[in-house]
Image: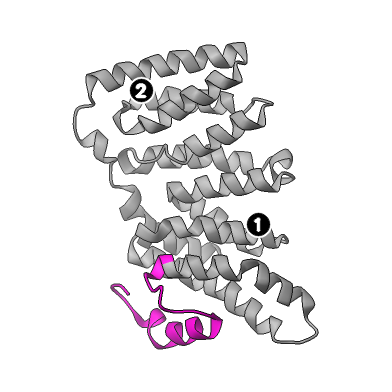
Amino acid sequence: MKKTLAFLLLLGLMPLLSTPAPAQDQEPDPEEVEAIDEALTELEAAIKDKASVDQIQFIKILSEKWKNATPKQRKKAFKLAGKNLKSKEKNVLEATVAALGAMGGGKKGKDAKTATKILLTLLKKKSIEQDVQMFLKVMDSVGRLQSAKGADELLSLLNHKSNEVIAGSLDALRHFKDAPFKTRKELVKEILKVYLGTFGQSRNPRNFTAQRKLRDIELQAEAALAALTNRADIKGAIAWQKWWNKEGKKANKGW
């Protein structure tokens, strides 16, 4: 797996991450910058006062205005997002996780890396892992950021003991649909290993565990494969295996 992810980093994701956020290629709108400063001030005060409604409102505003935020503002926003995640209010956590998923971009993908780092730290918390729905929301935001470390974590979760988590990882990997071809090809390869392996095991009439797993992850695997390959016409594990052997793994420039 480590070799695979090194391949992802060196040949696939780096071209994507090295592209600056479009909004940073031009001077930010002064009015937007002022509005972001105000949102940062309000969020800081809300965190201090533990005003959950305002914490939710202003972290959401920051994510919506992210493309106009200056590097200095983004740095402060990440700091405040980290503090927001210490809230005991679940709705504050959910809003912050969703906001972080929109806080990507930056020079050489710096902001996407920062947001991913915060989210991956959250994934390691026992309280988050025990809350499956929250765990899935964090995974989704990780996928939206399309960072190399995010891909690393999502691929590792394809081997999780919980079928629901595996399905969530597949859902999150769909967000890499606009990644460079070499990245998408490697992701498809890893997804097929899990999907086809499970399908093969499920054909044993006595392997009820594999049959249940296939039922739990099949739709998500199909959706992820369709998104990453832009081949919505292929349906079913056997069809995907035939496509991969005949065309998918041989392609060098695109599908």
**Residue displayed at 60% across by 21% down:** 52
Residue 168 x/y as whole percent: 59, 56
Around disc 1, counting alpha carbons within 10 Å, would you say few (fewer than 14), some (14 to 19), or many (20 or more)? many
Q: Within the magenta stretch, is there residue 222?
A: no
In the image: residue 224, left or right of residue 88: left
Q: CA distance from mark 2 to mark 1?
A: 36 Å
The residue where tag 1 is placed is: 165
The residue where tag 2 is placed is: 72
Residue 222 x/y as whole percent: 51, 71
In the image: residue 122, left or right of residue 126: left
Q: Which badge, 2 or 1, is on the more N-terminal residue?
A: 2
**Residue displayed at 80% across by 84% down:** 206
Around disc 2, counting alpha carbons within 10 Å, would you say few (fewer than 14), some (14 to 19), or many (20 or more)? few
Specify start and end residues of the magenta stretch as a single range: 227-255
Secondary structure under tag 1 reads helix
**Residue displayed at 53% across by 74% down:** 192
Front residue of 111 and 89: 89
Quadrant in the picture for residue 82: top right
